[in-house]
Image: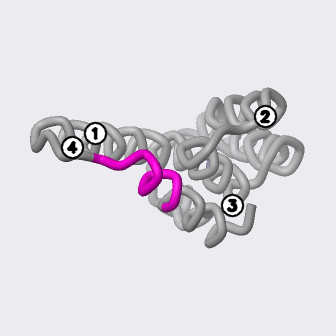
Amino acid sequence: MEDFAEKPYAAQRMSGVQLVFKIINEMIRRILHLLFLPCSEATLLMEKRNAQSISPKENRMLSMHLMICKWCRMYNEKLALLDKVFKKKFSEEKTEINESEIQDFKNKMIDKLNF
Ligand SMILES: [Zn+2]
């Protein structure tokens, strides 16, 4: 997930000072992305966290990334929402879910994600 497709600065009608702040902000954000975790890895960690679990270190990296990256925060919220919807649906239908089927599904997902 890259966010370079934002509106050009000129189109946003802001004063010179605001523009400088915005550019500095953007530069800091990109540097932090490089230091901590790129978006591609952050989204993978979110999926991994849902499918199995992630290490405390991975969790810290992901939390830091989510603090600085609004796109991944949005992705994270969507993921949480989907999770909630699925759980609600299953509980409403009182579907009998076999534990081994769930594990099987998780294993397939993990295989696909190459963990
Ligand atoms: Zn991100």
Instruction: Say what secondary structure mark 3 lies in.
Output: helix
For this view, does 65 lie left or right of residue 89? right
For the residues labelled 4 and 1, say whether their Cβ atoms are less than 8 Å apart. Answer: yes
Q: Main secondary structure of the magenta part?
A: helix
What number of labels is visible?
Answer: 4
Which stretch did the figure color magenta? 97-104
Q: Which residue is mark 3?
A: 40
The single residue placed furthest to the bottom in the displayed view is: 112
Tell me the number on the disc at residue 90: 4
| Neighbour tally class for label 3: few under 14, some 14-19, many 20 plus, Cα within 10 Å | few
For this view, does 26 lie left or right of residue 74? right
| Residue 80 x, y percent position in the rendering | 40, 39
Q: In the figure, residue 40 lies in which quadrant? A: bottom right
For this view, does 13 lie left or right of residue 85? right
Q: Which residue is mark 1?
A: 87
| Neighbour tally class for label 4: few under 14, some 14-19, many 20 plus, Cα within 10 Å | few
